[in-house]
Image (cartoon, helix red, strand yellow):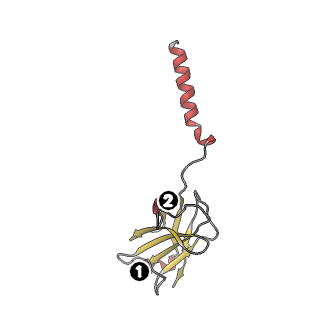
Amino acid sequence: MSRVAVLVFAALGAALLAGCGRFFPSSDLSISGTIALQEELSRRAGRPNTVLFVVATDRGGIPIAVVRIVNPRFPLSYRMGPPDRVLPSLPWKGPFYVSARIDRDGSAGPLAAGDLFGVYQGAVSPGGRGVDILIDTAN
């Protein structure tokens, strides 16, 4: 085989590999978006050791995945996926309902007085992008 033929086959192979994303769907099943804080609430969220919880629940409200961020700075980007499941045995299939909560005492329990929260409007499928949440409500 001539040197030119080898180069042609190498170039074709590289072109095919570069275009694989168009033919094979991405295996990234994570959910991602941006979380913003309503300006009127920003004073209440800036305390030391404040914790942001991003939670994906199933239809019944059972938490499937949780991301915990200490001392968040807004706006912030987040990503959650199968490694963030509460129990590894839980299936990673939607629909998910995603919310964000700023918890003043760092507790993952129910909302308490002074906690701030926001909810993504609508259901999210695995791989969902642009799942943006505005934290706009005080408990």
Disc 2 residue type?
A: Pro
| Comes first in the chain, label 1 or label 2 | 2
Circles 1 and 2 in contact, beta carbons < 8 Å: no
- 10 Å neighbourhood of mark 1: few (<14), some, or many (≥20)? many
What residue is shown at x 35% (from left), y 76% (from top)? 48
Residue sitting farthest toward the bottom:
113
CA gap, disc 1 to disc 2? 27 Å
In front of the other: 39 or 77: 77
Which residue carries the number 2 mark?
A: 82
Q: Position of residue 10 (x, y in %)?
A: 52, 24
- 10 Å neighbourhood of mark 2: few (<14), some, or many (≥20)? many
Q: Which numbered dot is residue 93?
A: none
Q: Could you say whether the residue bearing mark 2 is in a helix, strand or loop? A: helix
Residue 59, located in which quarter of the rendered image?
bottom right
What residue is shown at x 63% (from left), y 71% (from top)? 121
Disc 1 residue type?
A: Arg
Could you tell me how many numbered marks the image carries?
A: 2
Residue sitting farthest toward the front:
89
What residue is shown at x 62% (from left), y 65% (from top)? 95
In front of the other: 50 or 6: 6
Residue 67, located in which quarter of the rendered image?
bottom left
Q: Which one is in front in this view, the residue at disc 1 or the one at disc 2?
A: 2
In front of the other: 30 or 44: 30
Residue 18, located in which quarter of the rendered image?
top right
Left or right: where 121 falls relative to 34: right
Q: Could you say whether the residue bearing mark 1 is in a helix, strand or loop? A: loop
Q: Position of residue 46 (x, y in %)?
A: 40, 76
**Does residue 78 lie above or below 61 as drawn?**
above
Q: Which numbered dot is residue 104?
A: 1
Left or right: where 137 falls relative to 43: right
